[in-house]
Image: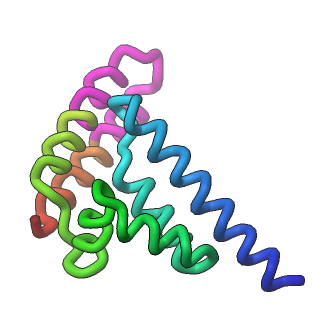
């Protein structure tokens, strides 16, 4: 019973990540590829057929394989992510949030952008 519950939870995570990634195709500020990577990772633990399908997918398969083998991120994805984080950082200043929250979010996104650009391509 425990094993089937764990498998079900891995599958649920994979499906949720896949749905979030699909939404990210249509919503510009929601990244697609990180959710697809999570879906493949969760699928490898509880749904091997989904993992195989994602690895063989014409659009997402190469990105998943590059990430798994070299931790690589395509330059185009780096630019999209940087632009999305910059836009989000600019938009957050319009919200009535405490200054420390606004600055903290921007610092975190800047750190993520630096990490991202240090990844191989």
Q: Is residue 25 above or below residue 37?
A: above
Image position of 20 with respect to 57: above or below: above
Q: Is residue 47 left or right of residue 97?
A: right
Q: Is residue 46 above or below residue 54?
A: below
* Residue drawn at point x = 29 percent, y = 54 percent: 59
Q: Is residue 96 magenta?
A: yes
Point out the image quarter for the N terminus: bottom right
Residue range of the region highlighted in magenta in the rendering: 85-106
Image mark count: 0
In the rendered image, residue 109, in percent from the top left (x then y), is placed at 29, 45
Q: Main secondary structure of the magenta part?
A: helix
x%, y% of residue 110? 22, 46
Residue 118: where, in percent of width, then height? 12, 64
* Residue drawn at (26%, 34%) of the image: 84
- Asked if residue 111 is positioned above or below residue 82 in the image, the reply reads below
Q: Which residue is nearer to you in this view: 83 or 8?
A: 8
Q: Quadrant of residue 74?
A: bottom left
- Asked whether residue 101 is drawn in magenta, I would say yes
Residue occupying the point 32% across, 67% down: 64
Which quadrant would the C terminus be assigned to in this image?
bottom left
């Amino acid at each position: 019973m425990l094993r089937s519950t764990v498998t079900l939870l891995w599958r649920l995570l994979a499906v949720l990540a896949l749905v979030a990634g699909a939404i990210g195709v249509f919503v510009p500020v929601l990244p697609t590829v990180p959710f697809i990577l999570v879906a493949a990772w969760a699928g490898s633990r509880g749904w091997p057929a989904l993992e195989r399908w994602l690895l063989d997918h014409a659009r997402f398969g190469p990105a998943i394989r590059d990430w798994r083998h070299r931790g690589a991120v395509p330059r185009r994805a780096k630019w999209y992510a940087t632009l999305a984080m910059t836009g989000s950082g600019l938009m957050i200043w319009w919200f009535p949030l405490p200054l420390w929250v606004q600055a903290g979010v921007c610092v975190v996104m800047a750190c993520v952008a630096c990490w991202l650009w240090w990844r191989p391509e």
